[in-house]
Amino acid sequence: MTFLSPFLLWVILPFVIMPVIIHLINRMRYTPLKWAAMDFLFSAKRSSTKFAKLREKIILACRCFAILCLALALSRPRSGGWMGWSFSNSAETVIIVLDRSNSMGALDESGEKNKLQRTIQMVRESAALLPRGTRFVLIDSATAKATTLQDLETLDDPLLFGVTDATCNMSELLQITYDYIKTNVSGEAEVWMTGDLQYSNWNPENRQWQALTGDFSDLNQKINFRMLALSHKVKENTSVSVRSATRTRYQEKNVLNLKLHLERNFEKDEVIQLSVKLNGNTTLRELRISGRVLDYTYTIDLPEGDKGGFGVVSIPKDKQPGDDSYYFAYGESKELKSGVISKSSFSKLLVAAASPVKGTNHKAQLISATQLPSILSKNYSLIIVEDSNLNQDQQRQLLSFVQQGGQVLIFPPIREGQEMLSAIKPGKVESSAEAPFVVDNWDSEQGALANSTQGEALPLNKLNISSRQLPLNAGEVLASYKDGGSFLSRYGRGKGAIYYCSSGIQKKWSDLYRGAVLLPMINRLITDGAKQYSSVINDNCQVREFSDLKTLEGNTQAIYKNLSAGVYEQDNELLVLNRPLLESTTQQITEKKLKNLFASSHFSMFNEEVASSGDENVQTELFSLFACLILIFLGVEGYMTLRKAQPGEEK
C-alpha cells in the first residue's frame, strides 16, 4: 500500500486517541462518594454493569477507528502495482538492472518523458518507500559495471544516466549481477530489472541463460527478481538508416551514393522530408512513401579533388527520436581493382562483370596465379578463381590477402576432395538430367545477395542450374537449393572472406553468365574488399572505450562517446558510430518466456502498458473502501449510543 498524500496521514493520525482523551476528561467531572446503600445496589446489578462497560468500550473503539479511517481516506491510499512491491521488500540490498538502450528513448503520449525517464521515476518513487539503510546497486547497460548509489537523485542526470545509442544484453547484465551478489551480498537481495522487453535484448535462445539461472538457484540466499516493463510501442514511427556510403566515379564525375533504408510500423501514403548534411552543407529532398519500407539511393556530386568527408541523414523527429538520424563518412577516391584467374572461355565474361561500366573506378583484368605476389599489394579488393588449380604457395598468398580484408570468389570445377584456402572441401559434381536445381532460399536483407536499392529481389529462383559441386563443409550458407544444399557459402577469415558458388558460369553448368545475379554479386564483393583500403571505420555504439576521440559530427556533450552516435576522428581515421539496427526491431519477449527463463527463481512482473489498460497489477485507489468503513463505524457507534436502555441497565 502507498499513499498519494502521506502528509495528511501523519497530521490526522494523532487525533485517533481524541475520543479516549475526551472520555477520560469526562469521567473526571464526577467525584466518587462511598455510600453503603448504593454499594448494595451495585452488587445486586453487577451483571448489567459489566454489559454497560462493554458497550462503552465498543462505542469508544468505533469513534477511534472512524477517525483512523478518515485519516487513511484523506491520505489517498493505493494498493498493488510496481510501488506496491516496495512495502513487501525485506532485502537489505536492491540491485537495479537499468536498460539504457536506444529504444528506451521512445516518448510517451504526452511527448514529455521517454521510457528511461519514466523508469527512473518509478524506481526512485519505490526506493523512497523502502526502509532506511537499504543499499542500492546500479548495473546499467551502458557501463556494464556494478556501482553503489549513494543518492538516487543522480539517476536524473541525462549526461550520466540518459539514453544511449547502444543496445542492451540482459544475460550479460544478469551475469554481472550474479557475480556481484556472490561476492558482496550475504543476505536476501532483490533484483529490479527494467526495460522495454525488446526481444533482441533478451535473446532467450542464448545457451547462457540455462547456466545463469542455474547459478542463481544454487546461491544460499534468497533472490527476488522483479521486472518493470514499459512495453508500449510508438503507434506511428519511421526509422532511417544508411546501408552504405560508396564513393565512385561515373561518367568522369566523382559521385557519392548513399543507399538509404526507411522503415515504418504503419502504412499510409505520405511525403517525408529528408535532410542530408554533408561536410557542413544541408540539402533537403521530399520522398513519397506508401508502404512500410522504402529503399532509396541518394546520389551527390562531389567536387574534383575531394579528399573525403562525413555527414548525417535525418528525417523529422517523431516519438522515437533515437532512429531518426544516421551518420556516414567516405574516404578518398581509389581505383577498385579485381583480378580473374581462369583458363576457360568464360574468363572474359568474369572480367566484364567486375568492370561493367566504362568511366567508373572499377578495373578488372585477367591474371595468372603466378602474378599473385606482385599484384596483391596494389589495392586489389577481389580475386575471382574459376576452373583453375592453385598450388599450396599460391593458396597461402590468397589466404593472406583475405585475412587483410580482401574477398575471394571461387567457382567450380575443383578436383573432388581438394581443400582450397583451408576452407572449401568440394564434393563430387552432380548433374540433373531432368529438372534443374532450384535456388529457393537466400539472405535478401544484407550481403552479396541482398535486394536492390529499389527493394527488388535478385532472380536467384529463376536460375537454370543443371550441374553443381556442393561443398562438404558449407560454412555460412547465404543461399541454398530446395534440397538444402548450399548454392553460395561464405567462409570468414580475418578481416575478409572466401565465397564459394557451387555452380559454374559455363553454359554446361548454369545460366549465371547472363548476369542478372552474377553482376550485382561480384560488384558487392568488390565494394566489401575495398574497405580494407578505406580510412573510414564503421561500427556500432557499444560498451567499448575508444581513446582520443575528436567529435566531428554528433553530440559534443556526450561523456561516453563510444555510446553516442556520431562521426569521430581517431589516429587520422574517421570512426563512424551508429545505433545497432537491431534496436529498430519491434518484436518483444512475452511474459511467458520470461517466466520460463526464471522458472527456478522467484519472479514477478509489472507491465505498465497492461496496467494502464486496467490489469490487476495496477495500483488501485482505496478511498471508497475507507469511506465505507467510516460509515460502518459511525453507524455502530450511533446504534450503541441511541438505542433504548433495557431494564436493569444503567442510563
Image (cartoon, rainbow, N blue to C red):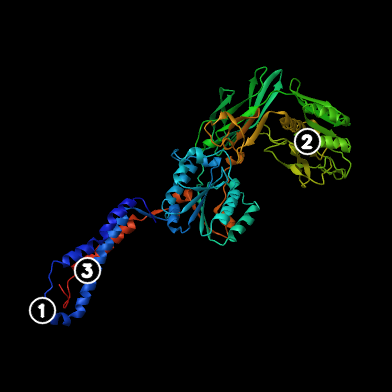
Pointer 3: residues within 10 angstroms few (<14), some, or many (20+)?
some
Q: Secondary structure at mark 2?
A: helix
Q: Is residue 514 visible?
A: yes
Question: In front: 152, or 536?
Answer: 152
In the image, what residue occupies the spot 54% across and 29% down? 271
Of label 1 and label 3, which has the lower sequence position? 1
Marks 3 & 2, CB-CB < 8 Å contact: no
Q: Is residue 490 left or right of residue 627?
A: right
The kind of residue tagged 2 is Val
Could you give the CA–CA distance between mark 1 and mark 2, rounded to whole angstroms?
118 Å
Q: Secondary structure at mark 3?
A: helix
Of label 1 and label 2, which has the lower sequence position? 1
Could you give the CA–CA distance between mark 3 and mark 2, rounded to whole angstroms?
96 Å
The kind of residue tagged 1 is Trp
In the image, what residue occupies the spot 68% across and 32% down? 452
Kindly identify which numbered label has been placed on residue 402: 2
* 584 is higher (above) or lower (below) than 66: above
Position of the N terminus by quadrant: bottom left
Residue annotated with mark 1: 35
Kindly identify which numbered label has been placed on residue 640: 3
Q: Is residue 592 visible?
A: no
